[in-house]
């Protein structure tokens, strides 16, 4: 699989997510399409999604519910596309969304493997390939990035790092769509900063590619530790997303965070 084929697969999947064409992400001008998750959308998306803005570095493609179409159209035509994902321009959008009972909810950067750089990295611990039947006892808080209890049927493959018989790190991937599997990784606090996360991530990426799937990796751009791990593991930035949801959902999420 070449880097060009990997990028093409990712754009086709984003097209399925947004109900647009893959070539829309290559245009120089902004594109607005009708909102609503497509039947082949990544499985972690959940309605209601009022708007989803995606950029692969050329423009913005926005999938928007009809009642917010005019507002989002004005926003992505008013500002340079890459400034639309940051302040101060984002405040312009937030001020107007608030009047509509909407808020910016999720913002993330996504990474794809560079086939010239992805290779298994050395690890001080022993590594073991894990499959779905190995995960049942691992749905615990310390492995919540690698595995997802709520969507455990999508967890298909993993790599564990062991200090003797003790599991100290875990990378897992979920089959969030037909051709792309998303990687998440956790390492116990006392074993961090020893190269275990990158060893797990790179090994799992290679295993995914060997199975004919495209691995992808997601991080908040402010999570420097996660970003460094992705880059060290052979991943490079590919696209960014910003999702708008009803303000009540954002409020509820913040309250849950405070309680936890």
Image (spheres, rainbow, N blue to C red):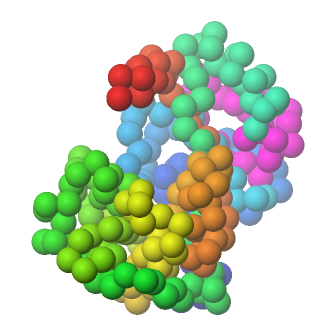
Residue 52 against residue 96 in the figure, above or below = below
Total marks shown come to 0
The answer to whether 98 is drawn above or below residue 238 in the figure is above
**The quadrant where residue 259 appears:** top left
Q: Quadrant of the C terminus?
A: top left
- From where the camera sits, is residue 182 visible? no
At horizontal 23% and vertical 52% (from top left) the residue drawn is 140
Instruction: Read off the magenta span.
Output: 59-85
Q: Position of residue 237 (x, y in %)?
A: 67, 65
Residue drawn 75% across the image and 30% down it: 90
Residue at the far top in the pictured view: 99
Q: Is residue 194 visible?
A: yes
Residue at position x 43%, y 49% in the image: 38
Check if residue 187 falls in the magenta segment.
no
> Could you tell me what secondary structure mostly forms the magenta stretch?
helix
Q: Is residue 162 above or below residue 154?
A: below
Q: Position of residue 179 (x, y in %)?
A: 41, 72
């Amino acid at each position: 699989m070449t880097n060009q084929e990997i990028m093409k697969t990712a754009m086709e999947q984003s097209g399925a997510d947004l109900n647009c064409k893959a070539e829309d992400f290559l245009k120089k001008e902004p594109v607005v399409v009708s909102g609503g998750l497509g039947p082949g959308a990544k499985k972690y998306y959940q309605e209601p999604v009022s708007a989803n803005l995606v950029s692969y570095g050329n423009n913005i493609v926005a999938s928007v519910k009809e009642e917010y179409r005019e507002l989002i159209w004005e926003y992505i035509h008013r500002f340079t596309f890459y400034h639309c994902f940051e302040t101060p321009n984002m405040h312009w959008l937030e001020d107007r969304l608030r009047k509509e009972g909407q808020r910016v909810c999720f913002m993330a950067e996504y990474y794809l493997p560079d086939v010239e750089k992805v290779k298994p990295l050395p690890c001080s611990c022993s590594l073991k390939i894990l499959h779905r039947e190995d995960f049942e006892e691992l749905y615990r808080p310390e492995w919540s990035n690698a595995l997802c209890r709520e969507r455990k049927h999508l967890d298909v493959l993993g790599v564990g790092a062991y200090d003797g018989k003790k599991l100290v790190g875990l990378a897992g991937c979920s089959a969030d769509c037909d051709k792309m599997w998303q990687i998440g990784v956790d390492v116990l606090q006392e074993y961090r900063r020893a190269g275990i996360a990158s060893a797990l991530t790179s090994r799992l990426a290679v295993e995914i590619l060997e199975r004919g799937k495209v691995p992808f990796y997601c991080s908040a751009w402010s999570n420097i530790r996660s970003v460094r791990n992705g880059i060290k593991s052979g991943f490079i930035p590919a696209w960014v997303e910003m999702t708008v949801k009803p303000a009540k959902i954002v409020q509820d999420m913040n309250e849950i965070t405070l309680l936890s």
